Amino acid sequence: MILEIVLHPFTWGLIPGLLLAAFAGLKVRQAQRELQRFRRHLSERLELEADSIQGLRAAKTGLEKENEQLRMKVSQLNQEPGRQAQRQVEILLRAERRVLVAVPGFAAAWEDAKHAAQLELEAEEAGHSMPRRVISRLLGRHPSVSIEDSSALPHGDGRRTPS
């Protein structure tokens, strides 16, 4: 009887079908294990990236606070009396550099004017002429007139008329 079952055509079709099913089952099982491994890998990577993003956000927040503190400190330092004049001189020096580069014919005339101003200032420092308030002229204010009583001047804006 067992020989009849083994030699039957149905058995010859059933054996390869079972072998193919077992092979397919093994492949499905391997694919499931690999999928689980990829899921674990992905979740670990997402956790690591979330931690690094959280660290970057904390660093960004710290840098923003530090930046704001530095901005406030710069603002306070710019409010000091001597610092505003120094800042205005720096602005004029930067403007001078740009003009010297941008306007080719202006450089020679500017250098002559600077040399004349230097000679004039040296003469003032040596006591050969009356001192002038260079910074006040650069800032456009007359040294003897404050902002409060500038309305007493003929122009009302801190300038005097030439006499």
Image (cartoon, rainbow, N blue to C red):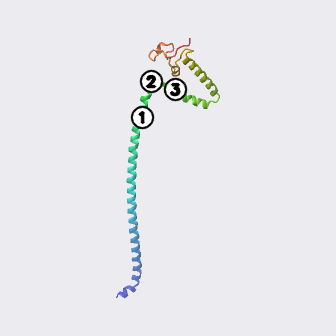
Q: Residue at x 40, y 35 (%)?
A: 69
Give amino acid for label 2. Pro
The mark total stands at 3
What is the crowding at mark 1: few (fewer than 14 residues within 10 Å), some, or many (at least 20)?
Answer: few
Q: Residue at x 60, y 30 (%)?
A: 100
Q: Which of the two discs, 1 and 3, labels the residue nearer the N terminus?
A: 1
Give the CA separation, mark 2 to mark 1.
19 Å
The answer to whether residue 17 is left or right of residue 163 is left
What is the crowding at mark 2: few (fewer than 14 residues within 10 Å), some, or many (at least 20)?
Answer: few
In the picture, the disc for residue 89 is: 3
* Callout 1 touching callout 3 (CB < 8 Å): no
For mark 2, what is the residue? 81
What is the crowding at mark 3: few (fewer than 14 residues within 10 Å), some, or many (at least 20)?
Answer: some
Q: 130 and 100: which one is in front?
A: 130
> How far across and down, in percent of the image, does residue 35 sit?
39, 63
Q: In the rendered view of the protein, which quadrant contains the N terminus?
A: bottom left
For mark 1, what is the residue? 70
The answer to whether residue 63 is left or right of residue 141 is left
